[in-house]
Image (cartoon, rainbow, N blue to C red):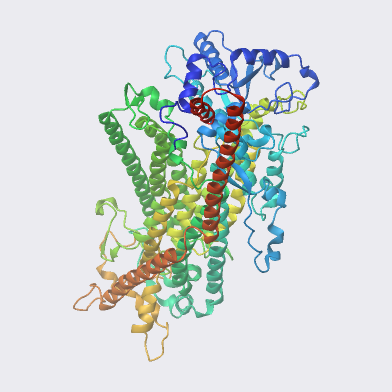
């Protein structure tokens, strides 16, 4: 956006002139080095021994500390000293005011602290450059009336001064030439601390530190080469108590009291206060996390009702009764589940697992799968509306995101050996050749593919473990003492032991690979040398999510869609590699593989959440405890505010990235496989209620205050959520069709049930095929001593197995029956119908719900109208004043009238930035 004549220098050009020419009176109001020295000499007379060091002000008690740099003076490193000297000199030239705390004043006796204050003129200049929106008129649109029965939500509400720490204003981008247009009561407090530290960081990121090479600039490079060891804005007080300074906001204390405390887990979040203190980027994350948690309540409620339905309809579970009936299930002898080490077994031994499976594999499963497909759409659409409201309330509607992220990464500048003219700025900029970028991208892709193959190999290893260990468990546990336990004895089966141990091993492998790949992903992303921070985050997001998707979900995909599907039949079994391996493919229990998918899902999902919360809370606390173990007992007057914050952990540029990644992986668990475990949303809800407070506690107490950053949305994660939402419809349709026994039961009920009444009696016998024991191959037949005592080979001639095949002696013996093809057709039909129904409803709901609420649209239009009206009136009043002054000058001066245009030009040029 142009803010002056095309021939006039822009603010950024003036800024560069200030750095190169040393400033002066014409330097946009910047203070010169001599001004700084005289000001610091005057402030040095203040007796700092009578002032608490737990303060956010310079020694004079007037100028606020907006940023702090810390370093250790290494006299042997002459280059570091020269860099610091040049860098700080350029900061002063740019108008920043500096004050140094000697190492003798620090707790460790070796750390220097450079405190930075940004004066009004610099704030005004860069607020104009960054197009920061500021208030110009109080909002006159009446608030919406309270919803009916809103008093029911009173217990979750926070005090009004916490929820809305600032009045509601109409805002407009700051213009230094129109100071009197804005509502400026006090210049010292007009810009909040989060905006001040953002402006300082903007200057620090562009300030050169080398006289010879002006390309070398930015605090990030100085942190990377060790010139400075830390750079951070200050927290405004200790988190557990208010600041003693009445001029300090103590917002950190307010956040800890009303937000980070675990006793407030049921309360709403003070999003406006979070945004004011930490900036919009962190604020939008917690807004999304809070909204996601709210929406989980409805999914958890419906899932819980489906689970209760399973409990309440236990008596209708005819097939489980048949399995548990000694005259039915007790007389059905099943074929061995593995070669040689597994013996024959009775179907009644799976009685408990059959009842457990029914809790999640019933009629409500289909309803819940369809409901979750619609819930996902509602969640994403309503989030768009909430996000649009936040964009307006937080002045992000017209945010120029490209400008916010177009700062070149220091690493990019360092590794670029060529330059070219930027088409937008027409200035020389570092350039990375396309051939080099292509080669690095190919190398990166190969590396990612290798790690994905590594994950698949580890999953194959876990599958091989399941196949090998199942035979051992079956042999060991047939006479195990655990079988005699009253309560859990019948639950501890070879299948259960194999599933649990394999899931635990898989979880450990997942965490190890995840730990290693995080570092590999960062390394290969650095190797690609992305140009901007936004490009860096997007590249890393794609790599990390692709890896995590395969890492966390591959074992669940195996159980859901592969286990028990390719087993063959007795006498012609399928093997994992080949028959020589001896690893026969796993079979599902007669109760189905759904209960095993549930077990896998619970272990991986719960284990990840518990481990994540421990890692997020415990690790930073232990590090901070160790670093500050000597200083934390010091009184406030000695343990300075900058030292306290220096001892905290640095959140890092990718801090929010990992928070989003954790929640998106959880989102995948509760959507992709929710048909197998309706209680998954409930577990996620409980976890997120803890997660919100853990993250709040971590940000408030364990991390340094991050530099405020703007963001108008959750970025690339929104597209990933949309992708998962679409994919979840397909996976749940396949789970209901191929993993659950719902379709075979319905086909039997409506087509093959005996008699005229619809009944499930006889379903178990119908779903099991017959095999002649004498036709077992030697490598498949159980070894001597493996069969149970009740088994008599003379009396037992056949065994049963779950499938739909013709019996021995039939002309098509061991071929699939017509019922098998009926069931397969019903499964495919269900998939097609469910997908189309859910997708149609999804698209209809997405079309029906507008992305931006009508109220927000009205407010945006009202604000834009007022901006035009007020600017017109402002310029009109200004023109009247100019004409009045010109008329007076004309009456008092005898100069020719042709001089008037020169006066107008000078006055007009004063308005230019």
| Residue 393 placement, left or right of 189 | left
For residue 565, above or below residue 770: above
Of 219 and 768, nearer the camera is 219
- Residue sitting at 43 percent across and 17 percent down? 214
Q: Position of residue 416 (x, y in %)?
A: 34, 24
Q: In this view, which residue lies farthest toward the right?
A: 50
Occupied quadrant, residue 530 = top left
- Residue sitting at 34 percent across and 45 percent down? 457
Q: In this view, which residue lies farthest toward the bottom?
A: 756
Occupied quadrant, residue 742 = bottom left
Of 206 and 682, nearer the camera is 206
For residue 34, above or below residue 192: above
Q: Position of residue 355 (x, y in %)?
A: 50, 71
Q: Position of residue 790 (x, y in %)?
A: 43, 71
Residue 162 visible in the current orientation:
yes
Q: In this view, which residue lies farthest toward the left?
A: 811
Q: Position of residue 329 (x, y in %)?
A: 43, 76
- Residue sitting at 70 percent across and 53 percent down? 158
| Residue 891 placement, left or right of 246 | left
Residue 588 visible in the current orientation:
no
| Residue 392 placement, left or right of 565 | right
Occupied quadrant, residue 73 = top right
Of 135 and 494, nearer the camera is 135
| Residue 73 placement, left or right of 528 | right
Number of marks: 0
For residue 409, above or below residue 721: above
- Residue sitting at 68 percent across and 15 percent down? 40
Instruction: Classify the position of the N terminus by image quarter.
Output: top left
């Amino acid at each position: 956006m142009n803010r002056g004549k095309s021939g006039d220098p822009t603010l950024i050009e003036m800024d560069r002139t200030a750095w190169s020419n040393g400033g002066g009176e014409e330097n946009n109001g910047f203070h010169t080095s001599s001004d700084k020295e005289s000001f610091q000499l005057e402030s040095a007379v203040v007796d700092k021994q009578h002032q608490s060091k737990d303060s956010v002000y310079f020694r004079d008690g007037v100028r606020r500390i907006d940023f702090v740099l810390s370093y250790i003076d290494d006299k042997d490193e002459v280059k570091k000293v020269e860099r610091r000297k040049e860098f700080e000199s350029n900061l002063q030239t740019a108008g920043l005011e500096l004050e140094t705390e000697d190492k003798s004043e620090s707790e460790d006796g070796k750390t220097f602290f450079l405190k930075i204050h940004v004066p009004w003129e610099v704030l005004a200049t860069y607020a104009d450059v960054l197009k920061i929106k500021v208030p110009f008129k109080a909002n006159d649109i009446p608030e919406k009336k309270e919803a009916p029965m809103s008093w029911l939500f009173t217990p979750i509400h926070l005090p009004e001064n916490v929820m809305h720490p600032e009045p509601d204003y109409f805002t407009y981008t700051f213009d230094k030439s129109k100071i009197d247009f804005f509502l400026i009561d006090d210049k010292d407090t007009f810009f909040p601390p989060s905006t001040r530290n953002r402006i300082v960081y903007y200057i620090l990121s562009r300030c050169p530190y080398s006289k010879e090479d002006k390309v070398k600039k930015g605090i990030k490079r100085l942190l990377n080469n060790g010139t400075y060891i830390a750079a951070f804005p200050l927290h405004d007080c200790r988190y557990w108590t208010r600041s003693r300074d009445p001029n300090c906001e103590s917002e950190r204390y307010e956040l800890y009291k009303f937000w980070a405390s675990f006793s407030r887990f049921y309360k709403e979040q003070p999003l406006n206060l979070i945004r004011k203190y930490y900036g919009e980027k962190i604020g939008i994350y917690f807004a999304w996390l809070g909204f996601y948690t709210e929406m989980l309540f409805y999914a958890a409620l419906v899932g819980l009702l489906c689970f209760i339905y399973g409990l309440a309809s236990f008596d209708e579970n005819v097939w489980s009764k048949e399995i548990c009936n000694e005259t039915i299930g007790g007389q059905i002898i099943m074929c061995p589940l593995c070669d040689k080490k597994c013996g024959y077994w009775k179907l009644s031994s799976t009685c408990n697992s059959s009842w457990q499976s029914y809790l999640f594999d019933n009629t409500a499963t289909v309803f819940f799968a369809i409901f979750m497909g619609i819930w996902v759409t509602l969640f994403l659409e309503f989030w768009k509306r909430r996000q649009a409201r936040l964009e307006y309330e937080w002045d992000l509607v017209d945010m120029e995101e490209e400008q916010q992220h177009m700062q070149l990464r220091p690493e990019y500048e360092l590794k670029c050996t060529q330059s070219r003219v930027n088409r937008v700025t027409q200035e020389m900029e570092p350039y990375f050749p396309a051939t080099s970028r292509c080669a690095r991208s190919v190398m990166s892709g190969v590396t990612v593919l290798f790690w994905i193959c590594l994950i698949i190999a580890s999953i194959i290893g876990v599958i091989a473990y399941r196949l090998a260990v199942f035979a051992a468990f079956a042999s060991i546990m047939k006479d195990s003492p655990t079988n005699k336990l009253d309560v859990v004895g019948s639950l501890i089966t070879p299948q259960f032991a194999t599933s649990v141990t394999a899931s635990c091993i898989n979880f450990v492998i997942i965490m190890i690979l995840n730990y290693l790949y995080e570092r590999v992903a960062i390394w290969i992303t650095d190797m690609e040398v992305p140009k901007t921070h936004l490009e860096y985050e997007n590249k890393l997001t794609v790599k990390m999510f692709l890896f995590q998707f395969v890492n966390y979900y591959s074992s669940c995909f195996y159980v859901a869609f592969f286990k028990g599907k390719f087993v063959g039949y007795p006498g012609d079994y399928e093997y994992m590699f080949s028959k020589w391996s001896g690893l026969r493919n796993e079979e599902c229990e007669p109760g189905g593989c759904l209960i095993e998918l549930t077990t896998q899902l619970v272990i991986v999902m719960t284990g990840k959440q518990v481990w994540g919360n421990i890692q997020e809370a415990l690790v930073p606390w232990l590090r901070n405890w160790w670093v500050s173990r000597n200083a934390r007992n010091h009184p406030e007057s000695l343990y300075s505010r900058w030292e306290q914050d220096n001892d905290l952990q640095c959140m890092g540029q990718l801090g929010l990235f990992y928070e989003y990644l954790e929640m998106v992986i959880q989102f995948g668990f509760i959507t992709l496989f929710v048909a197998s475990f309706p209680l998954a949303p409930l577990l996620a809800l409980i976890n997120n209620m803890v997660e919100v407070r853990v993250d709040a506690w971590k940000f408030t107490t364990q991390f340094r205050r991050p530099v405020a950053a703007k963001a108008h949305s959750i970025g690339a994660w929104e597209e990933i959520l949309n992708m998962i939402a679409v994919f979840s419809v397909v996976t749940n349709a396949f789970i209901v069709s191929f993993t659950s026994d719902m379709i075979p039961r319905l086909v039997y009920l409506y087509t093959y049930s005996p008699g005229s009444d619809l009944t499930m009696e006889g379903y178990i016998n119908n779903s099991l095929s017959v095999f002649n024991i004498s036709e077992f191959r030697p490598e498949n037949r159980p070894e001597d001593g493996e069969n149970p005592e009740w088994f008599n080979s003379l009396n037992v001639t056949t065994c049963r197995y779950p499938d739909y095949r013709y019996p021995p002696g039939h002309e098509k013996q061991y071929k699939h029956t017509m019922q098998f093809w009926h069931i397969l057709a019903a499964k495919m039909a269900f998939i097609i119908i469910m997908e189309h129904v859910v997708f149609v409803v999804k698209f209809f709901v997405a079309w029906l719900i507008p992305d931006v609420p009508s109220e927000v649209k009205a407010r945006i239009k009202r604000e834009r109208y007022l901006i035009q009206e007020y600017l017109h009136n402002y310029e009109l009043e200004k023109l009247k004043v100019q004409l009045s002054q010109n008329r007076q000058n004309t009456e008092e001066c005898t100069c020719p009238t042709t001089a008037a245009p020169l006066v107008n030009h000078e006055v007009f040029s004063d308005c230019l930035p």
